[in-house]
Image (spheres, rainbow, N blue to C red):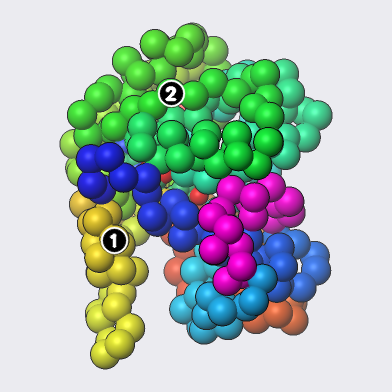
Amino acid sequence: MAEREASKTAIGVAMLRAVHQLWDGPPKILDDPVVMSLLSAELQDRIRAGTTGFLEPRSIALRAHVLLRSRYAEERLEQAVARGVTQLVVLGAGFDTFAHRQPPWARAINIFEVDHPASQRLKRERLATAAIPVPPNVIYAPVDFEHDTLTGGLARVGFDPHRKTFVSCLGVLVYLTGEAIAELFAFIASLPPRSECVFTFGGARGLDEPGKPSLATAAAAVGEPWQSSMEIDDVIAALARAGLPEPVLPTPAEIHSYLGNRTDGLGPPKRNRIASVVVGAK
Ligand SMILES: C[S@@+](CC[C@H](N)C(=O)[O-])C[C@H]1O[C@@H](n2cnc3c(N)ncnc32)[C@H](O)[C@@H]1O
């Protein structure tokens, strides 16, 4: 990512969530009345006009994955809060809006939004322009994972490493080097038992087809080249190196409960790219 530019891929996935609100059928996989307001007026117009190519099969597949990962993470978070988690860290938060549509059960937790300073700056500008208030339990931590330490960035804004924590890391690992991922997993491993991290993985480069660049090529073209590629065996090995247990994956029944039997074309992804690890689990 260019030094001072906000993440375009963050805007891209926010656009997919905004499209979902307007163009996909009920029930919403992710009910997000906030995300549209964070986009530029031009992009909002394109979404309303239906000119974002949202009916293309690849757009539908990516939208299903992006919606599923947020829904899954938010449901795991609710369960984690019920067992005593009091801090949420949203890594590479982008235009994630959970903080702005938080249900009553989330109001007692502290929400730390961690992102590249340029991305976080743009989000905060867009929130201010849209007159969306920042809830009192939201704390911003500007951190560039490749140059700053996550631990240091969080400590500067009052994160308590001794409290049970839930970490959401969606659509981020592919942008990090192996070294930064190892540091991230070491941070997770240092958290109290029953802390949890939900994350997405992947990154194997799909083949470019004529006129249809792969996701990796598209990300590189906007200045955000993928830095790593992990299949599930690589994930298990990297977690083990950090002293973490094997991950839990969403079950086919869970995926079906969100994405089965729909009439708008959204359906279960061909390959699962979402995982969760619970500190100290057997
Ligand atoms: C594809 S977006 C995902 C955003 C959000 N998690 C979501 O699902 O909507 C990738 C995010 O990772 C962040 N990111 C990428 N590289 C980063 C780095 N080196 N340090 C901090 N954040 C980074 C970007 O700023 C961006 O917000």
| Residue at numbered disc 2 | 141
Callout 2 environment at 10 Å: few (<14), some (14 to 19), or many (20+)? many
Observer-nearest of 247 and 128: 128
Q: Is residue 243 magenta?
A: no
**Residue occupying image coordinates x 54% and y 63%:** 42
Q: Is residue 33 magenta?
A: yes
Q: What span is in magenta?
A: 30-47
Question: Compared with residue 111, is residue 76 higher up or lower down, i.e. above or below?
Answer: below
Question: Compared with residue 214, is residue 166 higher up or lower down, i.e. above or below?
Answer: above
Q: Position of residue 257 (x, y in %)?
A: 72, 63
**Residue occupying image coordinates x 38% and y 55%:** 8
Q: Is the stretch drawn in magenta largely helix, strand or loop?
A: helix
**Residue occupying image coordinates x 39% and y 11%:** 156
**Residue occupying image coordinates x 45% and y 69%:** 271
Q: Amino acid at mark 1?
A: Val
| Residue at numbered disc 1 | 222
**Do the numbered discs 1 and 2 sit on residues whose CB atoms are within 8 Å?**
no
Observer-nearest of 167 and 281: 167
